[in-house]
Image (cartoon, rainbow, N blue to C red):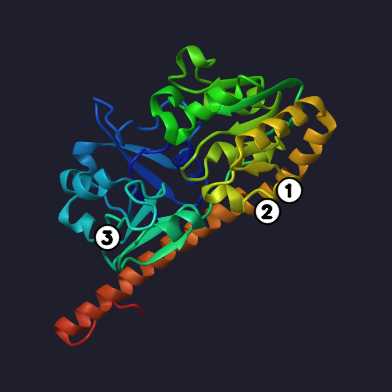
């Protein structure tokens, strides 16, 4: 199948590309959001193909996948043809609502679009209008690196944390690092971190740290958390959003809304490497069952097949209504 989408979240696109379909992404010389192309960060396979934005209308696709409001409200009208805009449509919502946690209406209100949430928490909180919705939880590949935990520190992996402030827990990070040894990596860390570690090098880098700390107050479930758990790195974080439904406190990680509690548990993990390995192993078992890439790819393959089949049947019904009998070309039989 031929899937058209925009390059929005590189790590998510990489995992999405593990399925049995071809993904086409547009490019622009100015590299604006969604038009970066493949880039050089992720080891995309041959099934991720770049198309200059001005040539998109010349290609045939089976399904269009939107990932941002701008994709849905602006981009599609600029680069897609009328025929392409009538193809089966999916909108991937990567985040929980920002304006109001329970009363924010989603930008999509269309029964012919399938709205995919990446966590059950997100689906619970969004007002998804009359749009059919479902959840496809994250899937990540298992790295060929084992967790050692030799560095008696915690690791935080967030891009541009100083600029993103309270939402992503910059104040919490600063509070905790006064009492717990922490390193921060990511783009835009400035004087507070070690800078960016590219995604392909991240598993080997973070495998050395005793635990992974997620200070984010309110966001979707980060792929970095799933990746850390898949490696057997113990995760410590706030008991908010989807993380509270992923980690069993004290068994597969530590979560709480009390920062003091989390600080105590982080220091426990630093002091007791064997305990850290046990917690990490339990979390790894959860990740292998819940976030395995085969399940993720299979669910996406099934959804693409379902929406295209529905679209074919709908066209057949429309033709029957218009002409009395379905044409051979559009017959579902």
Residue found at the far top of this picture: 191
Task: Please name the residue that numbered disc 3 is placed on.
Answer: 87
Q: Nearer the viewer, mark 3 or mark 2?
A: 2
Question: Residue 41 location, x and y as percent?
Answer: 47, 26
Q: Check disc 2 and report its element: helix, strand or loop.
A: helix
Would you say the residues marked 1 and 3 are in contact, meaning their CB atoms lie under 8 Å apart? no
Of residue 322 and residue 325, the one placed in the foreground of this image is 322
The residue that label 1 is drawn on is 285
Q: Is residue 209 left or right of residue 112?
A: right
Residue located at (51% from left, 50% from top): 19
Image location of residue 54, percent across then percent down = 19, 37
Compared with 267, 122 (above or below) is below
Mark found first going from the N terminus, 3 or 2: 3
Can you say which quadrant of the picture contains the N terminus?
Answer: bottom left
Which numbered marker is on residue 289?
2
Quadrant where the C terminus is found in the figure: bottom left
Position of residue 312 measured from the top left corner of the image (x, y, whole percent):
31, 71
Q: Secondary structure at mark 1?
A: helix
Image disc number at residue 307:
none
Is 155 drawn above or below residue 333 in the view shown?
above
Q: Are marks 3 and 2 in contact (CB under 8 Å)?
A: no
Disc nearest the viewer among 1 and 3: 1
Look at the image and tell me whether residue 200 can be seen. Answer: no
Q: Is residue 65 visible?
A: yes
Secondary-structure class at tag 3 = loop
- Disc 1 vs disc 2: Cβ atoms closer than 8 Å? yes
Dot 1 alpha-carbon crowd within 10 angstroms: few under 14, some 14 to 19, many 20 or more: some
Q: For the residue carrying disc 2, how many other residues have a C-alpha within 10 Å: few (<14), some (14-19), or many (20+)?
A: few
Mark 1 and mark 3: span between their CA atoms?
39 Å
Instruction: Between residue 3 and residue 117, name the one nearer to us.
Output: 117
Q: Residue 256: name its quadrant.
A: top right
């Amino acid at each position: 199948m031929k899937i058209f989408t925009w390059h929005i979240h590189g790590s998510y696109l990489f995992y999405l590309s593990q399925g049995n379909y071809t993904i086409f992404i547009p490019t622009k010389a100015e590299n604006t959001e969604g038009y970066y192309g493949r880039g050089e960060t992720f080891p995309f396979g041959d099934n991720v193909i770049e198309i200059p934005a001005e040539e998109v209308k010349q290609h045939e696709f089976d399904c269009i996948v939107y990932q941002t409001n701008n994709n849905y409200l602006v981009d599609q009208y600029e680069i897609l043809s009328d025929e392409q805009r009538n193809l089966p449509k999916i909108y991937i919502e990567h985040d929980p609502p920002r304006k109001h946690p329970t009363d924010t209406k989603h930008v999509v209100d269309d029964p012919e679009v399938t709205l995919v949430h990446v966590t059950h928490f997100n689906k619970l909180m969004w007002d998804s209008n009359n749009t059919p919705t479902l959840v496809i939880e994250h899937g990540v590949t298992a790295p060929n690196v084992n967790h050692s935990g030799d560095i008696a520190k915690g690791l935080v992996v967030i891009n541009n944390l100083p600029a993103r402030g309270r939402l992503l827990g910059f104040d919490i990070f600063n509070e905790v690092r006064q009492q717990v040894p922490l390193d921060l990596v990511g783009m835009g860390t400035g004087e507070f971190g070690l800078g960016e570690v590219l995604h392909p090098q991240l598993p080997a880098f973070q495998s050395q740290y005793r635990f992974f700390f997620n200070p984010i107050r309110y966001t979707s479930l980060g792929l970095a958390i799933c990746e850390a758990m898949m490696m057997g790195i113990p995760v410590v974080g706030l008991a908010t959003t989807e993380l509270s439904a992923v980690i069993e406190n004290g068994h597969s990680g530590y979560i709480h809304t009390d920062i003091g509690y989390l600080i105590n548990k982080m220091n426990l993990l630093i002091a007791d490497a064997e305990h850290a390995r046990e917690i990490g192993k339990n979390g790894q078992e959860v990740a292998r069952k819940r976030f395995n890439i085969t399940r993720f790819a299979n669910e996406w393959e099934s959804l693409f097949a379902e929406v295209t089949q529905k679209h074919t049947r709908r066209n057949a019904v429309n033709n029957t209504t218009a002409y009395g009998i379905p044409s051979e070309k559009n017959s579902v039989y």
